[in-house]
Image (cartoon, helix red, strand yellow):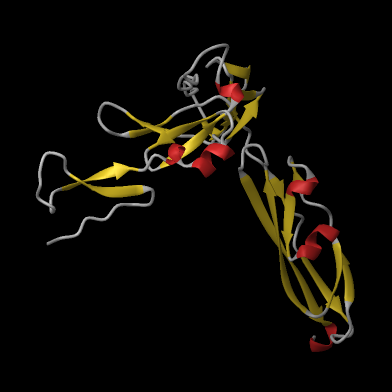
Amino acid sequence: MAACRCTADLLVGRNRFSYIVSVVHVLDINECEDSEILKSCPKSCINTVGSYRCLEFSDLQNDQSVPQVCSKLSLPRRGFFNCLRNGAHFKLNRKGRRRVVNDPGTRCELHCPIGYRLVGEYYVICGSDGEWIGKTSGRCKRSKPPRIQCPASQDHLVSNEKSTTLVNFRSPATNVPWKFVKSFPRWGKDLETNLTVGKYTVNFIARDPRSKMYASCSFTITLRSSQTY
């Protein structure tokens, strides 16, 4: 006879319509009946499927006995919402699918996809009255792509192939602030370094922090020994 197992916080119970032991159904444990849990929830406790949540004072308005929830946010033309739901619980719709409930205290911010940047502010919080509070003027606007142009490659003759030579070069031209430009090797951002005979490739990457777009360029530095000529 096959055994029936349940997930945490659920129990296997006998089907009240049958005396056959093999016919069972799943029972949800009401954690709100636990005295220790009730102590940790001084206001009240709400039992959910497989779990529970403490009811906060801000969840209620005046003499209401049911916490208010905020409606679903309408997606803007571009972008997506990143929401933080502390103590969020789930409800089932008519089709049995699980959906998230926007309880009071839920915080949502508008984030833009790659290639777009946020103009204005969009930050809302679900209030105790079931209404969204905050700023909703922010919109995602297409950004200009970043640009970067490296200096010309260099070729030097050195008299002693075992000694180092100080090489300097100009900063690459870019429309991105210098702090958002990275170089590989790292000494590239110093715009000078001591090198021995050899060929070196310097790469620069400029990244726009708002649009998440980037551009790159590279150039070479070659040091040759004059003794070989």
Q: Percent from the top left, x then y, of residue 7? A: 34, 52
**Quadrant location of the C terminus in the rendered image:** bottom right
Residue furthest out toward the top = 62
Q: Percent from the top left, x then y, of residue 12? A: 26, 50
Q: Nearer the viewer, residue 28 or 194?
A: 28
Can residue 136 be seen from the camera position used here? no
Q: Nearer the viewer, residue 214 or 129?
A: 129
- Name the residue at 82% across, 72% down: 156
- Name the residue at 77% across, 55% down: 151
Can residue 178 be seen from the camera position used here? yes
Q: Is residue 157 left or right of residue 218?
A: right
Q: Nearer the viewer, residue 135 or 130?
A: 130
Q: Percent from the top left, x then y, of residue 184? A: 71, 63
In the image, is residue 145 above or below residue 229? above
Residue 152 lies in what quarter of the image?
A: bottom right
Q: Is residue 178 left or right of residue 84?
A: right
**Quadrant location of the N terminus in the rendered image:** bottom left
Q: Percent from the top left, x then y, of residue 150? A: 73, 53
- Name the residue at 38% across, 43% down: 50
Q: Is residue 220 left or right of residue 214?
A: right
In the image, is residue 161 above or below residue 9? below
